[in-house]
Image: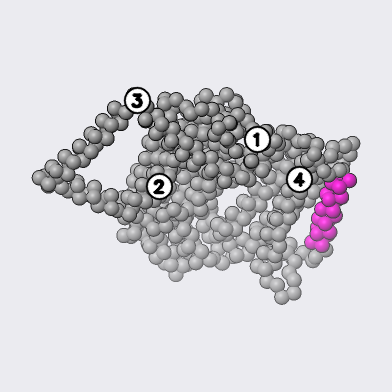
Amino acid sequence: MNALQLSRSADLPPVGAAAEVAELWAWALPLGLLGAWTCFQKVPGANWPLWTIAAATGLLVVTRRCEHSNALSRTHAALGLAAILSIAAAVTANPVADGLIFLSVASLFGFSLLATAMRTGDIGLLSLIRAPLDVSRLLFGEAAARVAETFAIVRMRDTVPIVRGSTMALAFAATLFLLLSAADPTLADWRQIAWDTVLSRMFLARDVFFVALTMLLLGGYGLAARKPKPTPETSASSGHSRSTSAARFSHIERVMVLGAAIALFTVFFAAELSHQPTSSALHLMPGETFAEATHRGFGEMIIAAVLCAIVIIALDQHALRGERELSVRLLSVGVVLASLVVVACAYLRVHYYEAAYGYTQQRLYVQICCGMVLMSLLCLAWELRSAIHIPRLIRHVALTAIACVAGLSYWNHSAWIVDANVGRYARTGKLDVDYLERLGRISPDAIPALIEALPHLTPADAQRVRESLRRTSPDQSILQPQPAAGEPSWYEWSLRRVAARSALRAAGLDGSTTR
């Protein structure tokens, strides 16, 4: 039995009243329709914050009776961050940023449901790792229970006339429509449109999306509306209760492990400093290129730093506290500081690579990943003032990751990459025109900057970029690589997509593929 196993017979109260079920459907059905209308195979834009804010509002309404202030405050904070991140979809037109926004918002909603279901904001590491599986199981299980509950309520004596009357009215209206459509051409056209729509594969796919989204919403809102009893496993996984049986490492063992890490880092730093420094502070092995020297060990350095953090946390969570606790913590801080230096070295290697070969989105993402690892290590160092509080550390690391995603989404990093490469071209005469063409195709955010950079390129390079932009459409996304025909809907509005269209139109490059 895991931390989120909520027994329907013992841990949950009896089925709710008809008013509660009606409230859940009143939120789930319209939001399912809204999502199917504005988000299914649509370009990300204003539709994402529109649906996210509406869904978050529904979750807050159904959790208004939650008695646990800690869980409720954490739910409010997570939903507020999800709303802020979703607004970035109406700002950026970068497909990668859209994907990160989607994953972040989904994770924040998952955390909100997890905190609401467990009635605590302090979620343990093991529960967080199992969260995707547990949340999915709970959502669909709760949705099935609420559907069964709905049928049970519908079978009540007072509702039988309403259901029976509605069914007969719909059947009668459909029969009349079929009869009258044979006599009126307009109704005949409507009948044919309805028939074609029903048989349309797109209609069926949209129906499946609507049903799945509605069931997820019904399960999530139903889970939030219930008041489960806390299970023993829940309190054990929260990180507050640490039984003495889990403490296995004495201060001697911890000092040995941490001391070995510091000794190894010392040898590594000494070996790095012993090399003859080059202009880029990279040591080239015989027959090794600059690119190979830059890539050498980059991933391993990041993994080493993360592994050190995991070891420190594991030792602290399973420690036997004693008189030498301060010494062990100082050693832990020393390992964290050494890990910070290693991450900084990995960052510098990418920086040198950019200086030599230019700036790309992938290289920028790697640098941001280094910064996120560095901030996470600083959060760990702050926790080492006393016993590490896992839920608080997880929240700090999650906020760091969310800040990185928000920064990438609101900051036009694609335009910055174009400007940085053009500036590097002015200084060195080196430019990767192929990448600029590809960047314009994969990120509409870069289109205005590319058009502004055309006068600074050679005529041949400028013509290549211009022809590539002529075949580029800003109305595409990571969910819909091929832009649909016709004018975009109002809910697909995005600030930088509009700017890209305007820039193409002003430069006379809005060909037939643009809208």
Q: CA distance from mark 4 to mark 2?
A: 42 Å
Nearer the observer: mark 2 or 1; the answer is: 1
- The residue that mark 3 highlights is 157
Q: Percent position (x, y) of residue 404?
A: 59, 46
Task: Judge whether 309 appears above or below 238 on screen.
Answer: below
* Element type at mark 1: helix
Q: CA distance from mark 2 to mark 3?
A: 33 Å
Per the rendered image, the range of residues in magenta is 252-272
Q: Quick check: is 267 in the magenta stretch? A: yes
Cβ–Cβ below 8 Å for labels 4 and 3? no
Nearer the observer: mark 2 or 3; the answer is: 3
- The residue that mark 1 highlights is 234
**Camera-side residue: 272 or 150?**
150
- The residue that mark 2 highlights is 209
- The residue that mark 4 highlights is 314
> Does the image show residue 422?
yes
- The image quarter in which residue 17 lies: top left
* Element type at mark 3: helix
- Disc 2 crowd rating (10 Å Cα; few below 14, some 14-19, many 20+) is some
Q: Earlier in the sequence, mark 3 or mark 1?
A: 3
Q: Earlier in the sequence, mark 4 or mark 3?
A: 3
Q: Earlier in the sequence, mark 2 or mark 3?
A: 3
Q: Which residue does the image show at 32% across and 54% down from the upper left?
A: 201
